[in-house]
Image: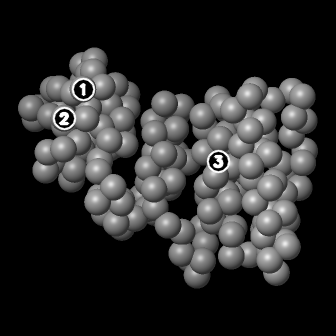
Amino acid sequence: MSALKTILSNRISGYDAKALAQTDIKEELFQLLFDPDKRTSDNAAWVLTHLPKTADAWLSERQNILIDEAMRTASTTKRRLIMNLLDRTSFDPDHLRTDFLDFCFNAILSDEPIGVKSLAIKLAYAQSVHYPELLEEINATLQLMEPEELPAALKHLRGKMLAKETTNNKTE
């Protein structure tokens, strides 16, 4: 077992996660993202979320692998963390992953935790921003969400995204 795997297989502090992210071990962290041990893979994802902004291009190169893992994992924690990583990447309008877009739309209206739903909204928007018909679908999906029944964080994000949609429509 590698020293990093030993560290990640135990409880780690936020300080430790930040310190590990500043070292040159992102490739090993990325490999441990797929470790069968839940704690190890969740901790690897958590440390990766602490990578500096300069690592965003590196994350973008692994976007498809991250998307596959976000859709496949049974760990809600890991899904949320990977979706945070995906939020740091840019989506190429010429290579739209419709399976992931569908996943995001389904997550928005599912019983997923608030963090996953919020990220699903942001990621669905990021993928759809170049396609007016998809933006209309996001708008319709957000309209289905009853604001009175939403937690404050989702209510705020819903309003913010609907306002973006209104702004986009005015500029066209």
Mark identifier at residue 168? none
User: Label 3 to label 2, Cα distance in Å?
Assistant: 28 Å
Q: Residue at x 58, y 81 (%)?
A: 94
The quadrant of the rendering that contains the N terminus is top left
Residue 40 drawn at (x, y percent): 29, 30
User: Label 3 to label 1, Cα distance in Å?
Assistant: 28 Å
Q: What amino acid type is highlighted by mark number 3? A: Ala
Q: Residue furthest top?
A: 11
- The tag earlier along the polypeptide, 3 or 2, is 2
Residue 27 drawn at (x, y percent): 21, 53
Q: Residue at x 78, y 40 (%)?
A: 109
Q: What amino acid type is highlighted by mark number 1? A: Tyr
Indicate whether 132 appears above or below 119: below
Dots 1, 2 in contact, CB < 8 A: yes
Q: What amino acid type is highlighted by mark number 2? A: Ala
Mark identifier at residue 19? 2
Element type at marker 1?
helix
Mark 3 lies on residue: 120
User: Label 1 to label 2, Cα distance in Å?
Assistant: 6 Å
Element type at marker 3?
helix
Q: Nearer the viewer, residue 62 or 51?
A: 51
Residue 56 drawn at (x, y percent): 36, 60
Packing grade of label 3 (10 A; few <14, some 14-19, many >=20) is many
Q: Nearer the viewer, residue 167 or 42?
A: 167
Left or right of 171 in this view: 22: left
Packing grade of label 2 (10 A; few <14, some 14-19, many >=20) is few
Indicate whether 157 appears above or below 114: below
Q: Nearer the viewer, residue 134 or 164?
A: 164
Mark 1 lies on residue: 15
